[in-house]
Each structure stands twice: as C-alpha cells, then as structure tokens.
Image (cartoon, helix red, strand yellow):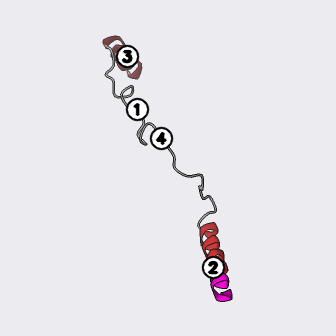
Amino acid sequence: MWKLVLGFIVFAGLALFVLMRSGGNIDMTGEKHDVTGGHADTSASAAPLSPAASEAASSASQ
C-alpha cells in the first residue's frame, strides 16, 4: 500500500514539474463557453466603402 502512495506522490510531483516547466501559465478553470466560437465578426471590416468614402480615400492618397 505504501508503494501506491509513494508512486502517486512521485507521479504528481513529476506532472507538476512538467506543467510548471512549460511556462507555468496553466488554465485550470474548466470549460470556456465562447459565444463567437473563436471567430471575430468580420462583416464590418468586409463592408464595401460608400462612394463618398472611396472618393475621400482616393483623394487623400494622392
């Protein structure tokens, strides 16, 4: 029985050593429920410019 306890302690110590060595920034808070699914909304940046905005942008670049 004492061998099982010793084995568990050694294994736990080794696991902590490996996890801390990999940067130490380990998130143990559980599942994250991201509503966006990890993707940002790109519809605003993909919208075409209005004619007035495109004229202003072309005149500013010249």
Say whether disc 1 or disc 2 marks the residue closer to the N-terminus: 2
Amino acid under disc 2: Phe
Between label 4 and label 1, give the one nearer the viewer. Answer: 4
Image spot of residue 10 (x, y percent): 65, 81
Circle 1 sits in a helix, a strand or a loop, which is it?
A: loop
Alpha carbons under labels 4 and 1: distance apart: 13 Å
Left or right placement of residue 55 versus residue 10 in this view: left
Residue that carries the numbered disc 1 in the rendered image:
41
Residue that carries the numbered disc 3 in the rendered image:
59
Between label 1 and label 2, give the one nearer the viewer. Answer: 2
Alpha carbons under labels 3 and 4: distance apart: 42 Å
Say whether disc 3 or disc 2 marks the residue closer to the N-terminus: 2
Alpha carbons under labels 3 and 2: distance apart: 71 Å
| Camera-side residue of 17 and 47 | 17
Circle 4 sits in a helix, a strand or a loop, which is it?
A: loop
Q: Residue at x 33, y 19 (%)?
A: 49
Image spot of residue 6 (x, y percent): 67, 84
| Camera-side residue of 17 and 50 | 17
Magenta stretch, overall SS: helix
Q: Residue lying furthest top in this view?
A: 52
Please give the range of residues in magenta.
1-8
Query: Which of the 4 image quarters holds residue 5?
Result: bottom right
Residue that carries the numbered disc 4 in the rendered image:
34
Residue that carries the numbered disc 2 in the rendered image:
8
36 vs 19: above or below: above
Alpha carbons under labels 4 and 2: distance apart: 35 Å
Q: The C terminus lies in which quarter of the figure? A: top left
Say whether disc 3 or disc 1 marks the residue closer to the N-terminus: 1
Magenta segment includes 14: no
Left or right placement of residue 35 versus residue 21 in this view: left
Say whether disc 3 or disc 4 marks the residue closer to the N-terminus: 4
